[in-house]
Amino acid sequence: MANVTVVGAQWGDEGKGKIVDWLAERADVVVRFQGGHNAGHTLVVNGVTYKLSLLPSGVVSGTLSIIGNGVVIDPWHFRDEMERLKKQDVVITPETLAIAETSPLILPLHSELDGFREDRSGDKKIGTTRRGIGPAYEDKVGRRAIRLCDLAHIDELGPRLDRLIAHHNALRVGFGKPPVDREKLISDLKEIASSILPFAKPAWRILAEEQKKNRRILFEGAQGVMLDVDHGTYPYVTSSNTIAGSAAGGSGMGASAVGFVLGIAKAYTTRVGAGPFPTELDDEIGQALGERGHEFGTVTGRRRRCGWFDSVLMRQSVAVAGITGIALTKLDVLDGFDEIKICTGYKIGDKVFDYLPPYYKDQAAAKPVYETIEGWKESTAGARSWGELPAQAIKYIRRIEELIECPITLVSTSPEREDTILVKDPFLG
């Protein structure tokens, strides 16, 4: 049995929640390895909708779940998300969830700084969720972070907090904001500590023991490859590495544990917030895709921008993330179109590119080169086998495989867990 790492292959919001939930039923452990509560997953199980943003998708099915050291954690959001799930009869305990004790914390000063920066940016906003993710990662790299294990020693945190606060106060002066209230921060940390400390554990050790037992481990990524801080559409990216290789460093396991890399991609393309989007459709087709696909962010509620499938972007994602197979979601959204377009290149000035250049002005100027194929009138919604798909839908899938140079291993035809066509079992490698 192989471990499986799930990553978004576009700009996030590809439907990872359903696929991870589907796989989690067959996994022994589910691990979040990067990001924070800026990444939302929606699960629909037996008609019940669960919305997660920090917790691993395995918590709904009762699978042992781990939040790895690569995740930045807002302890107040953690408490609130658990309470919300409890109202849906999902009870989470330290026996079913472990959080890496070395995980950096997102503090109120981080989300405040996030907001100050976005407000000052005017029309040059990055599109951050204002939840403090970026500033928390900055403090981690700057070796100023307060980590989960520190909450067990709050009375000894004075010098560490003073260094962190001094850094943030200097920034706040530049924004014309008052200094951090040190005493309130200490009081808030003491108040929240008891809600999260019972879950603090040596996650790397738990995972090593599970690996020795040949347990099936499912690594759950957040956002998408094109939001990776190194490989995405910089600067319109997230603050962490979203590629599959991060599953190792962000969980405390060796690189060999990553296993089968399953990239999740919609049958079309969407993006939330600012940044380049070559295939974006500002017309009735783009509006139809958004309405049919219910394209609103799980965390932000913002309407997603919609466009045709971008095979150039996907081929790039497959390469940099080491994707083994693709799970294609929301195929049913394309039902009924007379014709469907696939982007096969970008024209920038007088040149045609078969990849997205890194310079932001080139990315903004990229115009899609399209290939047009015939659509299908029959419904694909709820299909659970190839035999239930229209011939033209299968032709579309096969053409995508050729263009992105990667096989389609799963096809999702509705938000329901069981409406999935399995071509190849990722756990069998």
Image: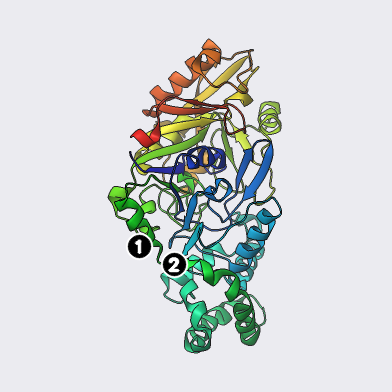
Query: In this picture, is 417 found above or below 255?
Result: above
Percent across and percent down for residue 329 are: 54, 31
Residue ID at (51%, 58%) = 97
Percent across and percent down for residue 204 are: 36, 61
In this view, the residue in front, 165 or 100, is: 100
Residue ID at (44%, 19%) = 398
Q: Which residue position holds label 1?
A: 205
The quadrant in which the C terminus is found is: top left
Q: Quadrant of residue 81?
A: bottom right
The quadrant in which the N terminus is found is: top left
Q: Which amino acid does label 2 sit on?
A: Lys
In this view, the residue in front, 327 or 358, is: 327
Q: Are marks 2 and 1 in contact (CB under 8 Å)?
A: yes
Disc 1: CA contacts within 10 A as few (<14), some (14-19) or many (>=20): few
- Determine the residue located farthest toward the top in the rendered image: 391
Q: What residue type is labelled 1?
A: Arg
Tag 1 secondary structure: helix
Residue ID at (62%, 57%) = 129
Q: State how the image is colored.
A: rainbow
Q: Which residue position holds label 2?
A: 201
In this view, the residue in front, 206 or 408, is: 206
Percent across and percent down for residue 47 are: 69, 36
